[in-house]
Amino acid sequence: MDDHEDTLELFRSALEAFGAEVVTARSARDALTIMKTARVNAMVSDLAMPGEDGLWLVQQLRRLKSTQGGGIPAIAITAHRERYAAERVREFGFEAFLTKPIDPFDLSRAVASLVGR
């Protein structure tokens, strides 16, 4: 999830190059709906978003039963490292933390490690 189309396209291209099927969302609410209704193996979310942000999204996700997506592993992405401490982000429920600009290989490797590939 990211509110910038170019970033979503970078995420999609990087992950599809490594064989992933990718569903994108431009808002936290849209992403939450997708995760409740689709089979998702991992989530990549920007933290700084207009409206509900990535922290809100992962909090909502962690409140769900595992059968509804509550256990989906999540990666936090931000261009604002100074605003978000990695330890704090993990306390909210993210398993990994990457900063922009994103190296496509690092993103793919992080997702692969979370889904056990």
Image (cartoon, helix red, strand yellow):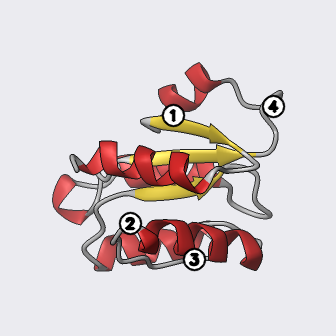
Q: Earlier in the sequence, mark 4 or mark 1?
A: 4
Q: Earlier in the sequence, mark 4 or mark 3?
A: 3
| Snapshot quadrant of residue 9 | bottom right
- The residue under label 1 is 92
Q: Secondary structure at mark 2?
A: loop
- Residue 15 is marked as none
Q: Are marks 3 and 1 in contact (CB under 8 Å)?
A: no
Looking at the rendered structure, the kind of residue marked 3 is: Ala
Q: Secondary structure at mark 1?
A: helix
| Mark 3 surroundings: few (<14), some (14-19) or many (≥20) residues within 10 A | some
x and y, in percent, of residue 97 in the image: 56, 36
- Residue 83 is marked as 4
Label 4 vs label 1: CA separation? 14 Å
Q: Earlier in the sequence, mark 2 or mark 3?
A: 2
Looking at the rendered structure, the kind of residue marked 4 is: Arg
Label 4 vs label 3: CA separation? 23 Å
Quadrant assignment for the N terminus: bottom right
Relative to residue 40, is residue 59 drawn left or right?
right
Which of these two is toward me, 27 or 99? 99
Relative to residue 2, is residue 14 drawn left or right?
left
Label 2 vs label 3: CA separation? 20 Å
x and y, in percent, of residue 104 in the image: 58, 56
- The residue under label 3 is 25
- Residue 18 is marked as 2
Q: Earlier in the sequence, mark 2 or mark 1?
A: 2
| Mark 1 surroundings: few (<14), some (14-19) or many (≥20) residues within 10 A | some
